[in-house]
Image (cartoon, rainbow, N blue to C red):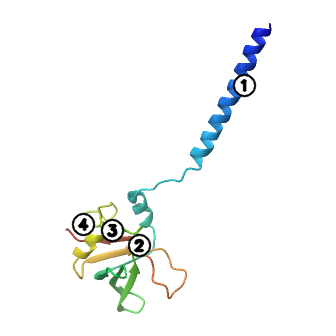
Amino acid sequence: MKRSCFIIIIVIAALISASIIVEFLLQRWETAPEVSSPEQEFYSYLELPSYSGKFLEFDQAKSEVTVLYFNTETMKINQKTFKIDKDTIFSKAIIDPYRPDLFLKEDLKKVKQETLTTVFYPAAEETNEIPLARLIQVEASF
């Protein structure tokens, strides 16, 4: 009798220990940061506001891109400058603008002036602030 009680107590203790370990691992797994790929971010960036126009210049020292666009409200051609950071994605929009054809920031120097370009950006908090580009799509083949 004593031996069977001892085995039952050991089995119950093992089950409780196993459930505590499993619960700890599940909590740790749920709180792990999600890693998103550039392809996943590409599709979410397509929903941001954008400017479409012609590529004017890429200032590598300032990490800025300037685009000429036609303002339909004022009926004038304006230019807009966007900042580029490490999270900015660069894509070619040759065949399908809704599929990622990613390229590196260094290849932006190969883009010729007046190439059709669309820049997607989040709305800036201040109006004087230069918007931060999240996705730059160019219709170039290089």
Which of the numbered marks, if any, corresponds to residue 127? none
Label 2 vs 3, first from the N-terminus: 2
- Image coordinates of residue 127 in percent, x first then y, are 51, 86
Mark 2 or mark 4, whichever is nearer to me: 2
As measured in the structure, the alpha-carbon distance from the residue carrying label 1 to the one carrying label 4 is 64 Å
Nearest to the eye among marks 1 and 2: give it. Answer: 1
Determine whether the residue tagged by mark 3 lies in a helix, strand or loop: strand
Q: Residue furthest right?
A: 1
- The span from disc 2 to disc 3 (Cα, nearest Å) is 11 Å
Which residue does the numbered mark 3 point to in the structure image? 90
Name the residue carrying label 4: 94
N-terminal of the pair, mark 1 or mark 4, is 1
Establish if 67 lies above or below 134.
Answer: below
Amino acid type, mark 1 = Ala
Q: In front of the other: label 3 or label 1?
A: 1
Q: Residue at x 41, y 72 (%)?
A: 85
Q: CA distance from mark 4 to mark 3?
A: 13 Å
State how far apart marks 3 and 1 are (Cα): 56 Å
Circles 3 and 1: CB distance less than 8 Å? no
Residue positioned most to the left: 142
| Front tag of 2 and 3 | 2
Q: Which residue is mark 2?
A: 85
Three-letter code for the amino acid on which mark 2 is drawn: Asp
